[in-house]
Image (spheres, rainbow, N blue to C red):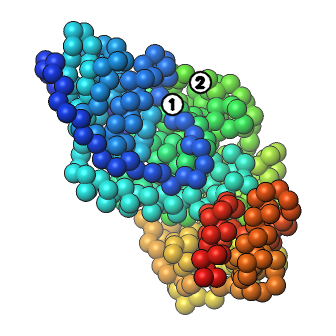
Amino acid sequence: MTKNKSVFTKPISIILSLIIVITSLSSAAVFTTSAAQTEGVVSFDESFYLKNKDACDKVADGIKNLEQHIDISDCKLSTGDVSELMYVVTYRNPGLFYVTGACSYYISGNYATVIVPKYSYSTSEIEEKQQTLDSVIDKYLALVDNSMSDVQKAVILHDELVLRTEYAYDPSMYNLLTEGKGQCIAYAFAYARLLSLVGIDSEIISSAKMNHAWLKVKIDGEYYNVDPTWDDPIADKPGHVQHTYFLYSDEAFQSGTNFSAHTDYESYYPATSKKYDNYDMLHRLNTRLCYSDGTFFAIDNKYKSEYEKCMIKYDETNDSATVVNKFNARWSAGGTSYWVGGYMSLDECDKILYCNTDNKIYYYDIKTGELNEYTTDAELNGKCYGLLIKDNQVYAVIADNPNTTASLVLAGDCIKREPDVILGDVNGDGVLTIADATLIQKYLANIVSLDSKQLAAADVNQDGTIDVIDVTKIQMSLV
């Protein structure tokens, strides 16, 4: 089934104002992002941006500061370029959900001197919505850390975005992330924003002929096409995320081999690397790739594949797999008939993997390598077509068959395990003392090295980074 695809068309309505006198300028507080590192760049119409960089950056900064009047009098921006300027600014800064792209402006001769953005909400509403959005984004960012490669981060954020959302006719990135529904431009903006916050560059791509948008992602210095919208099954299938349109060269993406071609688009950054074009296993996986301690785990559901209905360890460096466990399961199509392939999902909580068959749920302890049946009172009745974890609870995806709308049934709580380390107890003596804070300071000064367990204990605030904030946390705790 194909999607009715829709792209965010230029929402720019320019109101000409021949007032040359500039009114007083006002500003509001700058919003900070959730990122703790240098942000990646989101590109769009790079040629225009490079030609008008000063004007684009000033307008973007002014909007971030909620300025009502943004002075660009020294930028020599032609009045005929104002529409494109706003278009580029909103695309390059997908976090600016609170502007429509419309504006009015003051002119002097043939140049725009002051931009007057149109805000969708009041200042207090923007601040409230920003806090809501930041809290959602923080949940995404908590899934990745600085020890991961860019491709690992890209996979994890891609899967989480698709699993949390479903396709609907709404271009708002804010609504997609906070309410879980949106269309292609919302997916592209959301993914680009998340990638930027973990230091990964991307470029927003659109095709007027396809009426569709996606993006290119920069991995190890090369750009690759990724379409998160078309990786989200229609109708929405909870617990399932495709990788059919993940990391392709322009040549492969335009060819349409094994998937629908993406055509009639232009981009500043060509995707020439074919590194992932032949990653057949990655592209056929339709469950979350769960990452733990440097290893991806997945389920292969493809009919008659080498790893059909197997939980596997997946190596993204060479597209290979190692079997963890093979499951014997069949989903009844009535009588003596069965649906081909598998309908298993995989999800993770606290280093424990959960997967389903048609009538059972299993959990696999990554640390011990033990697989056990998960005890639940939920009635699966041979109709379990997936599962997912929400708020530390396991939900079974129940449907009459794989083509009907599914419902989520609570199976129970995630299994709790005792923590391996006490946060802050870097020296492992069982108590928090000033010695632990001192040990972190020595580590930051490159005086000592820490093993993996000590590093886990040193990340006191669990943000994936060890820094002076962790030292301060320990000191405050002692006080």
Q: Residue at x 66, y 62 (%)?
A: 468
Q: Is residue 305 above or below residue 433?
A: above
Left of 298 or right of it: where is 236? left
Q: Residue at x 70, y 76 (%)?
A: 424
Q: Mark 2: give few (<14), some (14-19) or many (20+) Cα within 10 Å.
A: some
Left of 121 or right of it: where is 381? right
Which of the pair 444/321 is nearer the observer?
444
Which of the pair 377/110 is nearer the observer?
110
Determine which residue is flagged by label 1.
Answer: 43
Q: Residue at x 37, y 42 (%)?
A: 64
Q: Earlier in the sequence, mark 2 or mark 1?
A: 1
On the question of residue 122 being in view, the answer is yes
Find residue 84 and report its image quarter: top left
* Quadrant where the image shows the C terminus: bottom right
Find residue 108 and report its image quarter: top left
Look at the numbered disc 1 and give the secondary structure of its residue. strand
For the residues bearing labels 2 and 1, Cβ distance under 8 angstroms: yes
Amino acid beneath label 2: Tyr
Q: Which label was assigned to residue 269?
A: 2
- The x, y position of residue 442, in whole percent, is 80, 63
Amino acid beneath label 1: Ser
- The x, y position of residue 279, in whole percent, is 74, 42
On the question of residue 181 being in view, the answer is no
Q: Residue at x 72, y 30 (%)?
A: 274
Left of 24 or right of it: where is 192? right
